[in-house]
Image (spheres, rainbow, N blue to C red):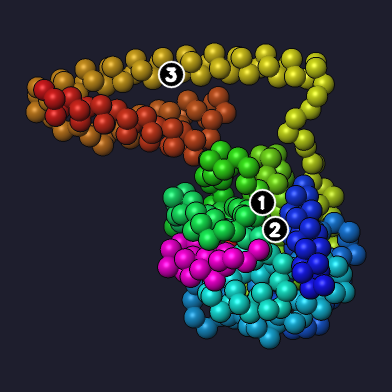
């Protein structure tokens, strides 16, 4: 009987896991029983969410902040699940937390950004999951390191966990002001390319750290074909015990989800596909030309390298580099290229030039 129950539960979770878009929401932290139940009730009333989240144990960057209510919050989530029928997910960082979560019928576990960075912790969680059938979502590590993220996925996969998903929550960068955690979309896109069959959802709450740009960020994720969203909600965001600035009410979440334009990745209309195909051909053509030009540019860099070497001049001349950047900012602005892109592009081109010249220095 008990086995049957657990099979049914696995099937329910499986169908929720496969739902697109998958929407997960709930408070940053479970604070009180009333808060958890009221949030769950109001979220369920929107009819728009598939899974309830709440932080029970909170790894905080600095001591003295609210570090989570602990295992005593787990029965509140159990109640919230009974009341709404929504499955629940919590963050785990240690073997004991995994054990507690499993004892209280948590349906999905997630590994937080501060845990993904640490292979010891990820391995501890993985060991506790050996032989357990539960889906696990893995947030990107705090720092932009795809190997660390991949390593965490591999550790969890190796112990036999079959359902693994990814959460993109942005990366911490020094001096960043617009976002709490820079999205660095290219990192998530690369992770998606490497794991084409793995679900990846976006967490705009931790990327933005504020509410006014949540919609824009969530829309961007949907436009980039993410499989869903995890968004923090609170019944009284201003008085939340953690992440107060980025939480919205369940009703605001409903508005946000209704404001998103949900696009499909593929459309079957023949006219649309033909038009798209034509434009893609143009892009391919231009990309080929760009590659040719870059090749030519490197050949000139090689010549300069030989010339510098013969005249005993260093490879890097900072003034010249600044001049290239300034020139390109001015030009780029006129044709709609952002400063951020120009820096990234020229950094890459410049590094390649330097490597070419270095090779000339070593070879001659
Ligand atoms: C959270 O989801 O509340 C959290 C702590 O997130 P992250 O691990 O992304 O910082
Ligand atoms: Mn949070």
Contact between labelled residues 3 and 1, with CB atoms less than 8 Å apart: no
Q: Position of residue 209 (x, y in %)?
A: 62, 61
Mark 1 Cβ and ligand 1 under 8 Å apart: no
Mark 2 Cβ and ligand 1 under 8 Å apart: yes
- Label 1 crowding class (10 Å Cα cut-off): few <14, some 14-19, many 20+? many
Q: Quadrant of ligand 1?
A: bottom right
Mark 1 highlights which residue? 201
Which range of residues does the magenta coloring cover? Answer: 111-133
Q: What element carries label 1?
A: strand
On screen, residue 294 versus residue 85, left or right, reads left
- Label 3 crowding class (10 Å Cα cut-off): few <14, some 14-19, many 20+? few
Contact between labelled residues 1 and 2, with CB atoms less than 8 Å apart: yes
On screen, residue 270 versus residue 211, left or right, reads right
Mark 2 highlights which residue? 230
Q: Where is residue 362 in the image (x, y as percent from the top left)?
A: 14, 29
Mark 3 Cβ and ligand 1 under 8 Å apart: no
User: Cα distance, mark 3 to mark 2?
Assistant: 39 Å
Q: What element carries label 2?
A: strand
Mark 3 highlights which residue? 291
């Amino acid at each position: 009987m008990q086995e049957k129950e657990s099979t049914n539960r696995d099937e329910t979770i499986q169908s929720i896991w496969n739902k697109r878009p998958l929407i997960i929401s709930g408070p940053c932290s479970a604070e009180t029983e009333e808060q958890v139940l009221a949030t769950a009730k109001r979220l369920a009333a929107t009819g728009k969410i598939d899974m309830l989240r709440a932080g029970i144990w909170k790894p905080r960057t600095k001591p003295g902040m609210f570090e989570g209510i602990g295992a005593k919050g787990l029965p509140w989530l159990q109640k919230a699940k009974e009341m709404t029928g929504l499955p629940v997910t919590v963050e785990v960082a240690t073997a004991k937390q995994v054990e507690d979560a499993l004892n209280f019928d948590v349906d999905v576990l997630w590994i937080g950004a501060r845990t993904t960075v640490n292979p010891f912790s990820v391995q501890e969680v993985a060991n506790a999951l050996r032989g357990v059938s539960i889906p696990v979502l893995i947030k990107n590590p705090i720092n932009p390191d795809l190997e660390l993220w991949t390593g965490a996925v591999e550790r969890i996969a190796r112990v036999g966990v079959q359902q693994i998903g990814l959460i993109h929550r942005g990366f911490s960068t020094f001096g960043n002001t617009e976002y709490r955690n820079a999205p660095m979309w290219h990192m998530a896109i690369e992770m998606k390319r490497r794991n084409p069959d793995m679900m990846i959802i976006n967490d705009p709450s931790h990327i933005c750290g504020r509410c006014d740009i949540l919609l824009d960020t969530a829309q961007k994720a949907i436009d980039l074909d993410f499989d869903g969203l995890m968004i923090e909600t609170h019944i009284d965001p201003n008085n939340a015990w953690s992440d107060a600035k980025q939480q919205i009410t369940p009703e605001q979440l409903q508005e946000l989800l209704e404001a998103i334009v949900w696009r499909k990745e593929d459309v079957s209309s023949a006219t649309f596909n033909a038009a798209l195909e034509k434009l893609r051909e143009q892009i391919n053509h231009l990309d080929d030309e760009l590659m040719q030009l870059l090749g030519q540019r490197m050949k000139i860099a090689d010549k300069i390298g030989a010339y510098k070497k013969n005249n005993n001049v260093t490879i890097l001349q900072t003034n010249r580099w600044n001049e290239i950047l300034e020139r390109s900012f001015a030009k780029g602005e006129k044709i709609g290229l952002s400063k951020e892109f120009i820096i990234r592009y020229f950094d890459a081109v410049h590094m390649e030039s330097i490597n070419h010249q270095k090779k000339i220095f070593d070879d001659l």
